[in-house]
Image: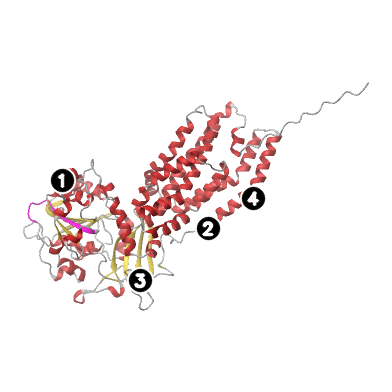
Amino acid sequence: MPPRPRKKRESAAPAPLQSRENQIANIPREEGHKSHIYILLIIPILLLIASLSLVTFLYLRDLDPLYGGVSINLHLDKIVWAATITGAFGPVPSLWPSLAILGGLVASIPVSSYWTALYTGRVNNPTLGSTVTHLVVLFPVIYLGVSVVKRSTAAFETYSSENSTARFTILPACATSIIGFQTIWGGLLGSYDLGYSDNEILRILGGTGIVLYAFSSTLITIYSSSKKLDKEDKSLSSLSTRGLLKPGLAVLFLSLSLWLMNPPLLPRPVTRPYTHPNFPLRILSSTSSVTGVIVVGESLPSDVQGTSERYPTSLRYLRASHSILGGVWIGDKIATRANSAPLLDAEGTPLGDSIYSAFVLQEAVRLINTSDRAIQPDREKALFIGLGAGVAVTSFARRNIDTSVIEIDPAVYDASRQYFGLPDLGSGRVFLQDARVVVAEKRRAALQYGASDADRYDYVVHDCFSGGGVPAHLFTTQFWEDLKTIMNPEGVVAVNFAGRINSDPAKAILFTLQRSFGQCRVLHDLPLDQPDLVDTFVNLVFFCSPSTKPLSFRSPSEADYAGSHLRAMIFGTLREREVDPKLIRGDTKDGNTWVLSDANNQLIAWQKDGALEHWSLMRKIFPESLWATY
């Protein structure tokens, strides 16, 4: 019998290679494991969204010393939304490579943000420069982060009964969470010391993404084996592992390089003075604090003979992020009247006059004629809201005026004590809190326990200007009413504002102070006539009193100058510094619409233009090296 023909073996076509994320998604589901997989997939998605928000917060803090808060937040929401939308619909690598690239970008933010901001700042346009920096540094991070969220959501929907709604809920939540959580991160990181700097946290977050990528093949292989995949699927996983071994090692090497790479920033806190190698600049102190990076530095004379001074030198300055809070002349620029001894800092270094005349102009509040006011010359009390470098506070304290200070940033107070000659004001006279809280507490205590005239403040100096703006909640009628409760009814408050005379913020502050106190006089700090002030960025000091008695300044004496040429010049020209309120009010007929209150306060929005102008102005006054070294 002829042999029976053999059947040909049916050869199955090789299964197409699956993407790495689909290998997980296509594993046969068991009902008993469904809830566990559901949790294992949703938690990483939520953690990734929270991490993107934290990365954005830390990136903005890195950028703040170079651009200030106003410019970096001006178009932030637009950048975040644009990156979220394009990340959700644009082309990206598969899940694990995207995670690796994302980790590398996050780890490099301390370097990339510094150098990008430094070079874009040379355009001298803070809006354009900060926006370009966002596009170069932040946009790719959010783009890739959202793409990873999108791919993770696809795997999540495989196990979720909400297949039709999950992606439409999670993806829009990315942009809203990234922006909305900024305040939360500020509160958490401000209240708890994690023991890591912002840049270290960024490197940890970035390194985590790269490590997950490097071990992703191993994790998938282990997980696949535990599910008893067939031999072919196992071989695919092994092939995937071999194929990603070299790229994984390369990315891991890159991440370690970025980990060790630091931007040219000083370690904070600075433990010993740092001298710039290429520019006559010395940093005495640098620390991260409540209002940003607090720096004490010195602009030194050039060693090159015959070099003209393009920028001011021989000065010591106090800086909070991108704002100079104050400063004094040092070295060869110290000059005193009548051979009087200069002020000394805690180390015994002589200090000269203030580099800003605005602080001395505020001191003119004690030149208010008190002959017809219930202010006892030998028992005067003063309250300063905002310390700065402590120039005016020190002047009051040296005249034996009982002086108290409210300053929100402890590092500013420490710097003033150590480097600017601020004396010890005594127990119970320094309040390192928000002024709104302190004044409200003092008001409650005064109403509850009663306060005699001797317990009230005769003079209040209110100077909270920083970074091109003022805190809006300290300029409302509610705040001024609280303040009047703890003031001598015939006392005087001096309120500083920097900006343009005919600006909306100046107008709102004037109408609000007039509503709260009844009468005000306005002085400026520049050697200009009134017509020339309209188009100039200028410091205005509003002198106001709740009393109906006229506000007049007495003639200064030599003792009022305290050995200062600057005080002699400012005090001797108060009459010429008067500003007609009509220049501020303009043709406004209804001032009530401009009064600031807790319920109606547009001061923050109105100050944006002034803050951007102030940034450009400060970049012209001080060199790039000063701003780039902190």
SS label for mark 4:
helix
How many other residues sit within 10 Å of disc 1, few (<14), some (14-19) or many (≥20)? some
Q: Are marks 1 and 3 in contact (CB under 8 Å)?
A: no
Q: Which residue is mark 3?
A: 300
Q: Which residue is mark 2?
A: 260
| 50 shown above or below 288 | above
SS label for mark 1:
helix
Q: Quadrant of residue 173?
A: top left
**Camera-side residue: 6 or 324?**
6
Q: Sequence-wise, which precedes: disc 1 or disc 2?
A: 2
Mark 2: which amino acid? Leu
C-alpha distance separating marks 3 and 2: 32 Å
Q: Which residue is mark 4?
A: 246
Q: Quadrant of the N terminus?
A: top right
How many other residues sit within 10 Å of disc 3, few (<14), some (14-19) or many (≥20)? some
C-alpha distance separating marks 1 and 3: 48 Å
Q: Sequence-wise, which precedes: disc 3 or disc 4?
A: 4
Would residue 495 appear left or right of 14 to someone viewing this image? left
**Disc ID at residue 127:** none
Q: Sequence-wise, which precedes: disc 1 or disc 3?
A: 3
Residue 564 visible? The answer is no
Q: Which residues are magenta?
A: 538-550
Residue 68 visible? The answer is yes
Q: Nearer the viewer, mark 3 or mark 2?
A: 3
C-alpha distance separating marks 4 and 2: 21 Å
Q: Which residue is mark 1?
A: 591
Q: Quadrant of residue 215?
A: top right
Q: Examine the residues drawn in magenta and state their main secondary structure.
A: strand
Would residue 64 appear left or right of 39 to someone viewing this image? left
